[in-house]
Image (tube, rainbow, N blue to C red):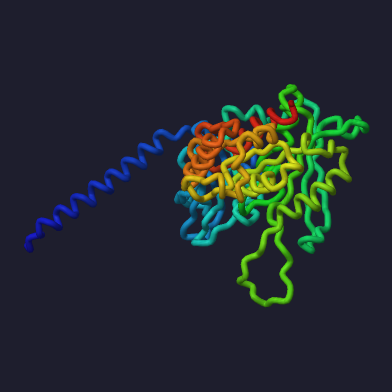
Amino acid sequence: MKKVPFFYKIAILLIAAALRGSIGMAQSDKATLVEDFKPASSNQPGKPYPQVNSQARVRASISAPQATKVQLDLGGKKYDLVKDDKGVWTGESLPQDEGFHYYQLNIDGASVPDPGSLYFYGAGRLGSGIEIPAGDGDFYALKNVPHGLVSENIYFSKLTNAWRRCFVYTPAGYNESTKTRYPVLYLQHGSFEDETGWAVQGKTNLILDNLIADKKAVPMIVVMDNGYANKPVTGTTDNTARPVSIFEEVMVNEIIPMIDTKFRTIANREHRAIAGLSMGANQTMRIIMNNLDKFSAIGGFSGTPNYPSADVIDPNTFLDGKFKDGAAINKQLHVLWLSWGSKEPNPFPGSIGAFRNMLDKQGIKYAQYESPGTAHEWQTWRRSLKGYVSLLFKN
């Protein structure tokens, strides 16, 4: 019998140990799985899957008899599903952060929405999303309180030469109290999302309804528009040219005048605020610093105008010196709010930290909030909105 070389024996032993370990971990992981799964609140009516258990694990299931491999793609990780004798694939994820998450299924290499979930616009497409119950979810729960109205407003933008729309929240009592005028918050989404983000994933109406009912926020109008507004391209066939954003011009010259005309607003800077998440934070901070005659408050959720840089900011040159005079900014801004998740990925901790250091150096006052146990995700921004709007229009 031919002698097996020593290093082959070692390799075989290592492979066997690894297999035993992986099997053991899989069995241990399965043993700790709590079987109290329930259909997610974000499912389509009557659909049993996906499900969530008390450990915040997600169970996905789909019938795909002809498929050879099916995975759950959630939270930056792909989980293999197991096929039964009826061709139904089922599997679970590791525990997820509280709140809302986009996800998809991968069937033989093709990424597709889960037919069991409602669809949400995010990551540049309509796709699946799942709600993981949160311990503090009461502030955006549907309750027996007076409810406001979210309306869809379609308008033609001469600046972009295109039809656009925004969603507008008006508080409870707006239609009945026809002589009352309201302050306005302009609220912007993040990259690869649109004007539906805050109204749907963000649960803005429920957050405002509950805060107003508890007298923790002033009744206000909230305008949620699309942050993608580009200069029309004419006379060129170059499809690779990067579009030129003119969202600031659209906001100042079209959206605000339209809202002040169509709704009963208090049309001055003292009663006008702006905020955004991620890309929207970058946009809105630049907008307010260029238009301090239009706004008196700014909220930056998981984003600052120096993104993605973590370099030290020179206030004399940054944004053309807009932060050079800290004392003047303190007089002009009633609220400057910064927030982020405790688990934010790079480069956000660095860029937000550099911006805060600059504010501290300039003596500029700001409120800050760190969302515990969440990353660059909707639960961070829901909590941020709750904290921010509680401070608005109270001077």
Measured as percent of width and height from the top left, residue 201 is found at: 66, 42
Residue at position x 73%, y 32% in the image:
208
- Please name the residue shown 7% across and 63% down the image: 2
Look at the image and tell me whether residue 26 can be seen: yes
Based on the displayed image, in which of its 4 quarters is residue 230 positioned? bottom right
Using the image as rendered, state which of residue 314 and residue 248 is in the foreground. 314
Looking at the rendered image, the quarter that the C terminus falls into is top right
Q: Position of residue 284 (x, y in %)?
A: 67, 46
Residue at 62 percent across and 30 percent down: it is 137
Please provide percent x and percent y for residue 277: 62, 44
The quadrant in which the N terminus is found is: bottom left
Nearest the viewer among 327 and 178 is 327
- Would you say residue 129 is visible in this rendering? no
User: Furthest-top residue in view?
Assistant: 214
Q: Nearer the viewer, residue 56 or 339?
A: 339
Q: Residue furthest right?
A: 179
Q: Pinpoint residue 128: horizontal percent, then vertical percent.
A: 61, 49
Check the image and report above or below for 372 versus 346.
above
Q: Residue at x 71, y 58 (%)?
A: 246
Position of 262 with respect to 225 (left or right) is: right
